[in-house]
Amino acid sequence: MDVTSADGTTIAFDRTGSGPALILVQGGFSDRSHPIWTGMAAALEPHFTVYNYDRRGRGGSGDTLPYSVDREIEDIAAIIKHAGGEALVFGGSSGGALALEAAARGLAIGKLAVYEPPYIVDDSRQPIPHDFEAQLAGLMKEGRRGDVVERFMTQAAEVPGEMVAQMRNSPYWEGMEAVAHTLVYEAAVVGPGNALPKSRFASITVPTLVLTGENSAPWMGKGGAALAAAVPQGKHRIVEGQAHDASPEALAPPAIEFFKG
């Protein structure tokens, strides 16, 4: 199925289950066919009508240029309208950051849950350059898709360079290069230096659950706690035994409890 966003872009989605509408918002390197998101949809659909969509530039969705975070927020608004005018939202990683931005703009979101949006609030990890989006966009303009992926992996995801060098020879590297342009979008969504926009998120009026993994890098837990404190109705919860690549089986129960509570 699909909807048409405000700028005419087609946004593709799968709709499963029954109950209140719940939209899933993916992070980097994924679309609606990724096992984490199909797994989340399967775990949530007994309780909700789940909208698992492809963000623009991925899967079956279009990619009208020039890109803007505002256009991605309009994509979520189009799905909310299709779903009946209000929805619950769950976002992971940079998809969580996008969901937060949508809530801050006043979209009709009943409740919001996010898993580890990558905001940096201390100096416990390497900083991300304030011009990171521009750096990635420059590489894309030169057609250096592999270098976009490598720079994103090493600087944003903290993957060691030698590991990325090995990944370049793997069979799945081609698929990562195919979505390299969307990594520029991720950098735009999270913002310069991955700084937490406290004043903007202070305007979020809906109950918001911030989940972080027990086994994730400490800076992610600190960022999650700071985010929950910045949102007026924010709550922070740690998911035991999980890291950034948390399993649907671990994420779904706290999300269901929160959304149905």
Image: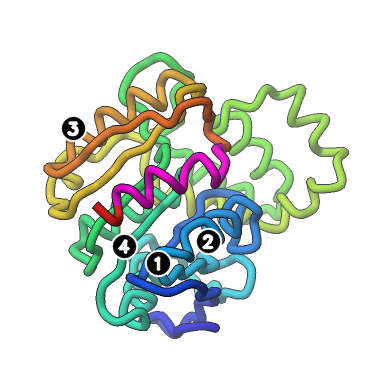
| Visual colour scheme | rainbow
Q: Cβ–Cβ below 8 Å for labels 4 and 1?
A: yes
| Magenta range | 246-258
Checking the image for residue 113, the label placed there is none
Is residue 254 part of the magenta span, yes or no? yes
Q: Residue at x 60, y 59 (%)?
A: 38
Q: Cβ–Cβ below 8 Å for labels 4 and 2?
A: no
Checking the image for residue 88, the label placed there is 4
Quarter of the picture containing the N terminus is: bottom right
Q: Nearer the viewer, residue 124 or 39?
A: 39
Q: Residue at x 56, y 60 (%)?
A: 42
Q: Is disc 3 placed on a helix, strand or loop?
A: helix
Q: Residue 6: where, in percent of width, then height? A: 36, 81
Is residue 50 part of the magenta span, yes or no? no
Q: Is residue 125 left or right of residue 177?
A: left
Residue identified by numbered label 2: 41
N-term mark: 3 or 1: 1
Q: Quadrant of residue 223?
A: top left
Local crowd at mark 2 within 10 Å, few (<14), some, or many (≥20)? Answer: many
Q: Is disc 2 placed on a helix, strand or loop?
A: helix
Q: CA distance from mark 3 to mark 2?
A: 28 Å
Residue identified by numbered label 1: 48
